[in-house]
Image (cartoon, rainbow, N blue to C red):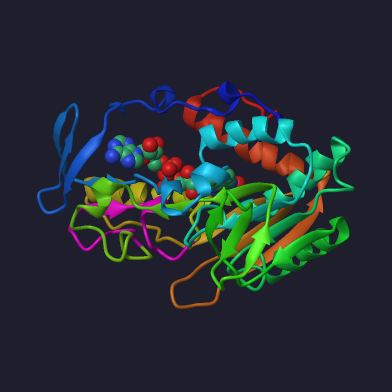
Amino acid sequence: MFGRTVPDAVRHLYRDIVKPGVRFVQTSVRAIDPVARRVETDSGAFDADVLVVALGADLDPASTPGLIEGGHEFYTVAGAFATREVLESFSGGHVVIGLTSTPFKCPPAPSETALLVHDYLKHRGLRDGPEVSVVMPFGVPIPPSPAASQSLLDAFAERGISWVPERMVRALDPARKVVLLDNNEELPYDLFLGVPAHRAPRVVQESDLCVDGWIPVNPLTLETSFPGVYAVGDVTSVGTPKAGVFAEGQAAVVANQIIAQHRSHDATNTYDGRGICYIEFGHDQVGRVDVTFRSGERPSGQFEGPSAIYAADKSEFGSSRIRRWFGRDWAAY
Ligand SMILES: Cc1cc2nc3c(=O)[nH]c(=O)nc-3n(C[C@H](O)[C@H](O)[C@H](O)COP(=O)(O)OP(=O)(O)OC[C@H]3O[C@@H](n4cnc5c(N)ncnc54)[C@H](O)[C@@H]3O)c2cc1C
């Protein structure tokens, strides 16, 4: 979005995963039968002993009136790179960054975007004029982490970024260049950067797995209510935020269960709901939240930074995953 990298550098193809015995089939899943553990795809049907559903969350910008015509979503790869061109040609005015629904992926991302937009506009010499506002339906930017939220609010205040709490974007009126909020107030905008509505993929919605839009699972084992069927990541309503770091932790627990089942012994670990999130503050400073979500308990965690140390930490976090999954060296920038 901010011209710091190119598409090829951030695209990691599933077919390049280097794990012995893993066959990657690039195809579309058309139907899931959790009772028969059978999946219909464009490449034929697959019958499974164990089925793990990890289809993520789809984005639905069309469900917010005016968003496609008058705004820009920055949550898809295509949307982020398109926004880069929009930012490059932006000549000033009011930038509004807003949420159109919950739940959404990566709770810090809208706040990070505001801080990075500020840096970007300042670098282009535009920041004296344009105002930046962040619209979110919460009292603070990241409710599970009061310390991270306070640090973000301090950063907003230092940079003159307006924080609009307890509000959601209902629609845009591109003709009048206004954002319509859920309390019927209006916010004028020159550039709108939106987080679009999230939905479970249609094939999941149409299966018997879905309850209230997402797949409920046992929070300790990630098992669905169907024997031998698990779900991990954004497609679940497990109670952790929709973030890759939680999907990764959940996948490890499921892998452990499958191995234990194969070896006919009990699984040794259960899901602890823990994840580390890095938060971009701009100026190459990154904060780090170590947070645990346990079913029925308040989330607990620790926030540190922002600092250049955690920027290096974040970079290593990314590189280590690419090394482990794809067997190659990689650097974020
Ligand atoms: C702007 C942004 C910033 C983020 N930053 C962070 C961060 O800093 N840290 C973090 O931990 N997380 C971050 N996230 C969130 C993270 O990307 C997701 O939570 C994570 O990718 C979820 O993993 P998943 O495996 O559940 O789903 P996904 O990674 O979405 O994978 C699901 C896959 O299933 C495929 N699929 C869907 N339907 C079908 C079908 N019918 N047939 C075949 N394939 C299908 C999809 O194409 C996709 O490839 C960020 C997200 C965004 C948008």
Give the position of the C terminus as an image quadrant. top right
Residue 329: where, in percent of width, then height?
A: 61, 23
Q: Residue at x 87, y 59 (%)?
A: 158
The quadrant in which residue 44 appears is top left
Seen as rendered, the residue at the extreme front is: 175
Seen as rendered, the residue at the extreme left is: 36
289 lies left or right of 41: right
Residue 30: where, in percent of width, then height?
A: 20, 39
Is residue 197 highlighted in magenta?
Answer: no
Q: Residue at x 21, y 63 (%)?
A: 225
The quadrant in which residue 314 appears is top right
Residues shaded magenta = 221-240
Residue 198: where, in percent of width, then height?
A: 43, 53
265 lies left or right of 163: left
Residue 250 seen: no
Residue in the foreground of this view, choosing between 271 and 76: 76
Residue 182: where, in percent of width, then height?
A: 54, 69
Residue in the foreground of this view, choosing between 214 and 262: 214
Q: Residue at x 63, y 48 (%)?
A: 192
Residue in the foreground of this view, choosing between 159 and 292: 159
Q: Is residue 297 above or below residue 246?
A: below
Give the position of the N terminus as an image quadrant. top right
- Quick check: which quadrant has ligand 1? top left
Q: Tell me which secondary structure the magenta stretch mostly adopts.
A: loop
126 lies left or right of 266: right
Is residue 234 highlighted in magenta?
Answer: yes
